[in-house]
Amino acid sequence: MKKKFKFIDLFCGIGGFRLSFDELGGECVFSSDIDKYASQTYEHNFGEYPSGDITKIDASEIPAFDILLGGFPCQPFSYSGQKEGFEDKTRGTLFFDIVRIIKYHKPKMFLLENVKGLKSHNNGETLRIIEETLIELGYHIHWKVLDSLNFGVPQKRERWYCVGFDKNVDFSFPKGKNSNPKLRDIIIESDNNDKSLKLTDFEIERIAKHFKSNDVRVKHDNSKYAPNTKKGKYGIYSFQKSDGSLRFHVGDVAKTQIQEAFYSCMDTYACTIIANRTPKLWDIKRKLSVREAARLQGFPDSFNFPVSNNQAYKQLGNSVVVSVIKAIGKEMIKSYFGGVIRIDLFSNIQTNSELEIQRSNKTQHVGNL
């Protein structure tokens, strides 16, 4: 079966974008990432090793494509120079490489992803430059912050998504569903016996101390911390939130609280999984396994990791949520082409109405015989 469209996968990591757009019927014609361990996982699951550093790859070396995908790192933008166009405004950042590739290939669409904080980075100046640059390239853009909790995974992960089209289309970001997913939906009971996932004795003891107390905010022993540190000076307090999660913070009730640890439970959702933090649950006294963490990011159980567990956790923490990307991609294709039921390439699209006309013409032709 012919693929519907061609796309490229920049800063591809382990392939969350690719997995989503493969399922939508696309063909990946180029991928790139600088992390060798993430590239090993990508090759293991997709059968090809990504090209390396995108800053060293000329746009002319990339095959023609229809959609550009990229979760680019947000580096500080340089504001020196004359600022005489997007090249001057974005030079020295990885966003610049997205821009030069778009400028050369002029794809029909793109989908970019970044952290929620991009909205306010440098008092909004970074986002303003990104918007102006993409518009200057001739694209109609839409951006929004979406939460993965609304897309079937029990994780509060808010991310900035930006969609661009080479023509004005009626696009709306998917709203997702308020399905109230919970961690028990992804938990693998047999993993409860994995000793490597168990919380430390120190963690288990202070969790037990919290639930033995009748106080709303429980003060924990701070004598083990140096008195000149924040933990030693203000102490550690624990507090159970209304959703059942347990939070440890530095500082007393009257002071600004600094979160020190966060434990979810089976009947709530996880905090955002990041490269150096794997969600932990106080009620089953362990952290999530790699497979559970993959489910938390929307990856199917058929997706495998040929690397160490530490690398797998890191890779998942850096990944996009597959279910969110797929939902956005579906709306992109629907908005650009309308009722699409068969696509060879985007340049040879056939909509429902066009196919109906063909059927009518064919019937009329047979009747004339």
Image (spheres, rainbow, N blue to C red):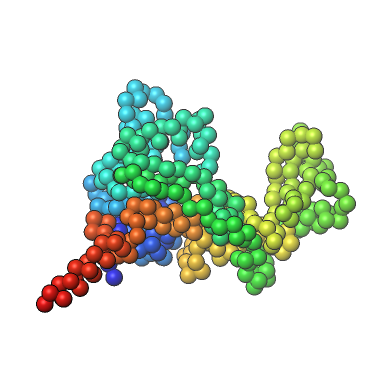
Looking at the rendered image, the quarter that the N terminus falls into is bottom left
Is residue 248 visible to us here?
yes
Question: How many marks do you count on the picture?
Answer: 0
Q: Image point 43% across, 51% down: which residue? A: 35
Q: Position of residue 87 (x, y in %)?
A: 32, 32
Most extreme residue toward the front, as rendered?
368
Spot occupied by residue 311 in the image (x, y as percentages of width and height): 52, 57
At horizontal 66% and vertical 71% (from top left) the residue drawn is 189
Residue at 55% x, 63% y: name it: 295
Residue 211 position by quadrant: bottom right
Residue 49 x, y percent position in the rendering? 35, 59
Which of the 4 image quarters holds residue 101? top left
Q: Specify the quadrant that holds the C terminus.
A: bottom left
Image position, residue 96 (x, y; %):
35, 38
Write down the quadrant of residue 50 in the picture: bottom left
Is residue 10 visible in this depiction of the protein? no
Q: As drawn, is 214 to the left or to the right of 70?
A: right
In this rendering, is residue 61 above or below 309? above
